[in-house]
Image (spheres, grey):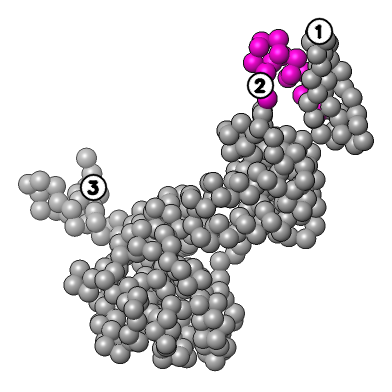
């Protein structure tokens, strides 16, 4: 058995001769890829494991992947993001390339070009999608090996969190329009994500047990599942908020979806519209700096942490997938000097109230006695 590397135009081929028969395998635009493919094919033919793969261009396969996998397995918002990346960026770059001709070189070149114009977070999302597409192409028999398997996502620096203080939150609520003031207050006191807030329905609120059940999210007027399975949760609410919601139910716009916070016409809200026409103007009227709507969720987290709530409880209330996420995002708040002193005082109070069986002296006092 003999093998050689041939070049036609800008494309290298691995050619394997077995007796009178010759098989050509497209390898790509780099000679090192051709050498790798040649070695693989000779080994496969020798072992009797060489089989043809399904032929498709990247454009054909990516559309197949969207229809067969993404449309079935991801949320509408995620699907829209995938479609945009594939059709706006990836297909124009590689759409006519045979899937098997793409290599790690193509991906690295793509990443290098993107670094010139977009943030590492954006590139991280795009490379994650590329890895998913080629993982399935390998599983489904369209390529012999996965060239994106070792594609590394860029490191993303976590942005500094903008958090309003309690006084600023009070000013914001005081200058909010009447229709959306309670929605803003609910975000502050529950830490719900925007999509979860706007998707709340009255049956989701138990004013007796003082709990809100997060069951769905709203995205561009359509209901979808929350961010993850951990986002489906029960959020405890203070009595003050329960009373406010009870009064709001009597005057809120009636709507067919039974939404707690519809727009004034009784329709599902457009989050972008609320931010542009109500949230940002309220910040301006209150003389506050510009922050994102998501900062209300950050304020809730900071309030919980400063109050000394258990980190695991904070995680469950915010709907994080793990406590690691909570600590990664808000860990710096747990290191605040005042927070740390408060924990010591709590420990002292707990120990001071504990009693040794048969002894009336508090545990702290007992521990200070000489042996």
The answer to which image quadrant residue 301 occupies is bottom left
> Disc 3 versus disc 1: distance between alpha carbons?
90 Å
Which residue bears the numbered disc 3?
367
Answer whether residue 363 is visible to the viewer in this image.
yes
Q: In this view, does 285 lie to the left or right of 237?
A: right
Helix, strand or loop for disc 1: loop
Numbered disc in front, either 3 or 1: 1
The 10 Å Cα crowd at callout 1, few under 14, some 14 to 19, many 20 or more, is few
Which residue bears the numbered disc 1?
19
The answer to which image quadrant residue 178 occupies is bottom left
Helix, strand or loop for disc 2: loop
Specify the segment rendered in magenta: 33-52
Quadrant (top left/top right/bottom left/bottom right) for the C terminus: top left
> Disc 1 versus disc 2: distance between alpha carbons?
18 Å
Marks 2 and 3 in Cβ contact (< 8 Å): no
Helix, strand or loop for disc 3: helix
Q: Is residue 285 left or right of residue 244?
A: right
Q: Give the mark, 1 or 2, whose residue is nearer the N terminus.
A: 1
The one nearer the camera, 344 or 244, is: 244
The one nearer the camera, 76 or 245, is: 76
Q: Give the mark, 3 or 1, whose residue is nearer the N terminus.
A: 1
The one nearer the camera, 209 or 95, is: 95
Residue 34: % across, % down: 82, 26
In the picture, the disc for residue 366 is none
At horizontal 54% and vertical 92% (from top left) the residue drawn is: 285
Q: Is the magenta stretch mostly helix, strand or loop?
A: helix
In the picture, the disc for residue 51 is 2
Quadrant (top left/top right/bottom left/bottom right) for the N terminus: top right
At horizontal 25% and vertical 82% (from top left) the residue drawn is: 246
């Amino acid at each position: 058995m003999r093998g050689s590397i041939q070049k036609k135009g800008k494309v290298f081929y691995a050619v394997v001769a077995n007796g009178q028969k010759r098989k050509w395998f497209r390898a790509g635009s780099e000679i090192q890829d051709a050498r790798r493919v040649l070695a693989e094919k000779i080994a496969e033919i020798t072992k009797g494991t060489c089989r043809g793969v399904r032929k498709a261009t990247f454009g054909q396969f990516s559309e197949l992947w969207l229809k067969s996998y993404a449309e079935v397995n991801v949320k509408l918002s995620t699907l829209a993001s995938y479609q945009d990346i594939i059709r706006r960026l990836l297909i124009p770059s590689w759409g006519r390339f045979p899937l098997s001709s793409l290599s790690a070189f193509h991906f690295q070149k793509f990443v290098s070009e993107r670094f010139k114009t977009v943030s590492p977070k954006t590139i991280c999302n795009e490379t994650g999608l590329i890895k998913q597409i080629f993982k399935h192409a390998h599983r489904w028999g369209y390529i012999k090996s996965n060239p994106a398997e070792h594609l590394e996502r860029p490191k993303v620096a976590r942005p500094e969190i903008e958090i309003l203080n309690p006084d600023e939150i009070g000013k914001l609520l005081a200058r909010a329009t009447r229709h959306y003031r309670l929605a803003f207050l609910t975000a502050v006191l529950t830490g719900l994500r925007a999509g979860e807030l706007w998707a709340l329905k009255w049956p989701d609120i138990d004013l007796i047990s003082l709990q809100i059940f997060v069951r769905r999210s709203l995205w561009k007027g359509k209901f979808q599942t929350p961010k993850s399975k951990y986002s489906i949760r029960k959020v405890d609410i203070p009595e003050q908020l329960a009373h406010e919601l009870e009064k709001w139910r009597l005057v809120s716009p009636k709507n067919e979806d039974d939404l707690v916070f519809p727009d004034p016409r009784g329709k599902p809200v457009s989050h972008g519209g609320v931010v542009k026409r109500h949230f940002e103007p309220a910040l301006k009227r209150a003389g506050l700096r510009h922050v994102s709507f998501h900062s209300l969720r950050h304020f809730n987290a900071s309030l919980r942490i400063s109050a000394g709530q258990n980190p695991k409880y904070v995680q469950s209330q915010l709907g994080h997938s793990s406590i690691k996420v909570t600590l990664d995002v808000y860990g710096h708040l747990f290191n605040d000097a005042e927070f740390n002193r408060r924990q010591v005082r709590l420990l002292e109070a707990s120990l001071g109230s504990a009693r040794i069986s048969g002894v009336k002296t508090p545990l702290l006092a007992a521990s200070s006695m000489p042996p």
